[in-house]
Amino acid sequence: MFGQNLEVQLSSARTEDTIVVWKSFHDSITLIVLSSEEGTSELRLERLLQMVFGAMVLLVGLEELTNIRNVERLKKELRASYRLIDSFLGDSELIGDLTQCVDCVVPPEGSLLQEALSGFAEAAGTAFVSLVVSGRVVTATESWWRLGMPEAVLIPWLVRSLPPQAARDYPVYLPHGSPTVPHRLLTLTLLPDLELCLLCGPRPPLSQLDAQLLDRWWQPLLDLLRTCLPLGPRALPAGFPLHTDILGLLLLHLELKRCLFTVEPSRDKEPSPEHRRRLLRSFYTLVTATHFPPEPGQPEKVEAAAHRAQVPRACYLVSGAEEQGTGWRLVALQLGPRRLLLLLSAQSPTYGLRGLATHTLHALTPLL
């Protein structure tokens, strides 16, 4: 505030063990985040604040946040967003909060699911429908994929953060597409953790989406739907060939704004899934902030623009000692709109990292 009075913009500060980042939204709401987590970057915390404000708009609407008439009432209304905001602060299995890309999975027979989804959407009378497993999109209609950021990431997160229910009729604002006029988010549970999500206006009423309609489109695909359940943490179809050294991967399609994220390969090896997620998340913030060009839609700093003549295509990091057989290997590769990050076991030789990453990216390209 002192800096603001002198027309100086201060966006972050550090102490010996803590980083503080704050951001003002629409000259109305200021959010402040403090983190003493080891290795936390400003990029991570800036994106966290963007997601938190997006969550507030999603559930309260922009008008309430920019034209505050009653602070106590606003505080009460914001309680609806606490559960969603808490999910950003915990150790989530998802990564869309950081990458600002939609967490996806690849189902075994995607075309059959897509066909059923399109038919169901037409019968239900809305163009915006998706099938979501554990917060990750399995398949969606074209209109759903065209949703802007951050709602495309926030809605599956919201559904995952809510207590399980057979059906819901939930008012939401779209922070990018419709921040002041609410839409209805309808959810229908097909199997535990597998839900249909529909965005619509006043129609159809939830009662119209009865068991008969669900049975007609989804009963014939029940076995296929069951094969989607383990896809939550795995992201890739069963039996997809991955090199045995791979312990985790993050594949981003920066134009489509979708990503695949898994730490399931070679589960019997060290480190733990939580540690793998932390390693990949911190590696993502490192390569995004320092090595690769800014992602589409991200503002570019002037000094960064000067160095764009030579854009790196790949980089790697050895976590721990570099002697063969110790420390994890992390490698990132960018090819066109795709960026692949791999976490590899200590046995993987550094001279083979780029070749392994290139081979893996080519194998994954048809999926995303």
Image (cartoon, helix red, strand yellow):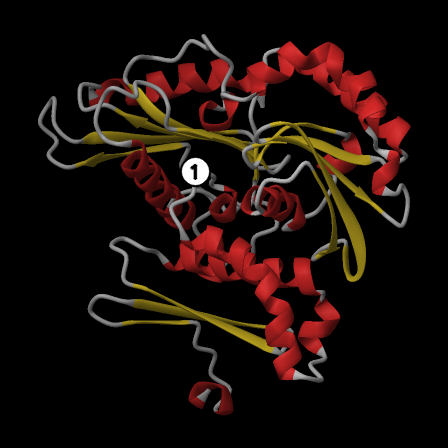
Left or right relative to 346: residue 279 = right
Query: Which residue lies at the image location 32% right of the left edge and 55% below the top edge?
Result: 40
The residue identified by callout 1 is 93
The quarter of the picture where residue 74 lies is bottom right
Please provide percent x and percent y for residue 149: 65, 49
Whether residue 226 appears in this view of the structure is yes
Please provide percent x and percent y for residue 231: 51, 22
Mark 1: give few (<14), some (14-19) or many (20+) Cα within 10 Å. some
Left or right relative to 3: residue 226 = right
Whether residue 306 appears in this view of the structure is no
Query: Which residue lies at the image location 43% right of the left edge and 43% below the top edge?
Result: 92
Please provide percent x and percent y for residue 195: 66, 32
**Front in this rendered view, residue 89 or 314:** 89
Query: Which residue lies at the image location 72% right of the left edge and 65% below the top edge?
Result: 61
Left or right relative to 310: residue 272 = left
251 versus 106 height, above or below: below
The kind of residue on which mark 1 rests is: Glu
Please provide percent x and percent y for residue 143: 79, 36
116 versus 179 height, above or below: above
For the image, the number of numbered tags is 1
Q: Dot 1 lies on which element?
A: loop
Query: Which residue lies at the image location 71% right of the left edge and 17% below the top edge?
Result: 113
The quarter of the picture where residue 200 lies is top right
Left or right relative to 134: residue 318 = left
**Front in this rendered view, residue 331 or 134:** 134
